[in-house]
Amino acid sequence: MSAPHIGRVIKLDFKTYRDEYTDVEVTRLSDGIGHTVHIYFTRNSMDRKGEKLLCVSNRTGWWQLYIINLKEMTMMQLTNDANVGACCLSYDGRKAYYWDGRFLKSVDTETLERDIFFAVPENFHPVDMSISLDGRFLAFGYSEIVNLSTASGIIYSGMLETLYRRPRSLVLRLDVSKREVLPLWGECEWISHININPVNPDEVLFCHEGPWHLVQRMWIVKASTHEVYPLLQQKRYLERAGHEFFTNKGRVVVQFARRSTPSSTDWTSYDVFLNTDGSNIKMFKYRYLAPAHIKSRDDEKVSVGDRAFPDPSFKDGAAFLGLIIYEDEEAIVKPLCRHGTSWLTQNSHPHPIFTPDYKGVIFTSDREGECNIYLAHIEGIV
């Protein structure tokens, strides 16, 4: 017998409007019932055809996975679990993988068949997940649960204490077809942002979490040899890097900045593209303020960001999505449309991503009170 609500299909009425500033057409995909959020931007959330979009919603009073079918304008509930966490979608759109508390599970987006692959040990919590293009390998981790004395309930308030407590962490890779889990690397460091190279799943990118200027952020581990090495080595206190991700061609993209002294605020920001061995580095400098998060096209010519400050005169840039055009070692920002989110919670962050055909940009906003998912139509713009 199916669990309550699983398989329930909701008919959506996509609502389209024109942005008042840029005249870009934007469509609200979700229906404003509860909060509906597209998943974290480093994890795959759409099938290759751009017809299925994995999201989470608390419309039933509890966060669950849903799949939005953009072609049929429907939204189907995939789970009815107690503690749904990080998730991702296979690139063929058939399987959604997710954490339910300590348990790594999957659900078939068509048959709704479910499976359990792994359980995190007690006193540890799961960390992230990402999937290879062929759907065979899933990378994830777990980290020691730390009872914090300085966390105030404000986002990131416990970051420094967690960093200095150095919780035990482990990076792992699951062979889905063989159901084999391989520990790749572990240490007494706060590890997060675990991303598998989509075209070479022997390589897994992970980060040392914490304030970006206090850690050597990016690391690569090779599953075949367990070799570990830092990527884009930073000068502590003077340089920072973060929000790293892979393009579908296996290149690493990272937001980077440097300043003149450990106490100065004269940060100069860059978007950086590089290979996993540290070679073929391309750096693009921002003339003014950089977005908080970006997502790049595979051709490395354009990114989308969740803030748009083309110059100091554009005062409302925190409320706009921006297209970033890379020309002559510069990152040139062009306002795309107003997202208008409050930024008050992690769920309300826009975290924009491109659709697979690069004709649209998916983002989240609570501009109407509840978090909804929106699609900005950019065909012909870049």
Image (cartoon, rainbow, N blue to C red):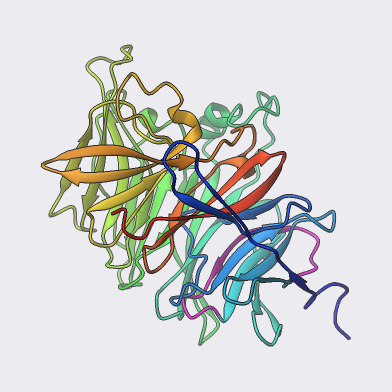
Against 345, is 141 above or below? Answer: below
Q: Quadrant of residue 13?
A: bottom right
Question: Of residues 338 and 99, which is closer to you in this image?
Answer: 338
Q: Dividing the image into 4 quarters, which one contains the N terminus?
A: bottom right
Question: Of residues 235 and 321, which is closer to you in this image?
Answer: 321
Magenta span covers which residues?
A: 78-93
Residue at position x 39%, y 63% in the image: 359
Q: Position of residue 53 (x, y in %)?
A: 57, 67
- The answer to whether 26 appears left or right of 278 in the picture is right
Outermost residue, top direction?
A: 263
Is residue 229 visible in the rendered image? The answer is no
Q: Position of residue 149 (x, y in %)?
A: 69, 25
Against 74, is 120 above or below? Answer: above
Q: Dividing the image into 4 quarters, which one contains the C terminus?
A: bottom left
- The answer to whether 303 appears left or right of 48 in the picture is left
How many marks on residues? 0
- The answer to whether 16 appears left or right of 261 in the picture is right
User: Was residue 90 drawn as part of the magenta stretch in this picture?
Assistant: yes
Q: Quadrant of residue 238?
A: top left
- The answer to whether 308 appears left or right of 340 in the picture is left
Against 4, is 15 above or below? Answer: above
Residue at position x 59%, y 36% in the image: 341
Q: Position of residue 118 (x, y in %)?
A: 63, 72
Q: Report the predominant secondary structure element of the magenta stretch.
A: loop
User: Was residue 318 drawn as part of the magenta stretch in this picture?
Assistant: no
Against 163, is 178 above or below? Answer: below
Q: Position of residue 131 (x, y in %)?
A: 46, 70
Is residue 352 visible in the rendered image? The answer is yes
Question: Of residues 223 and 346, which is closer to you in this image?
Answer: 346
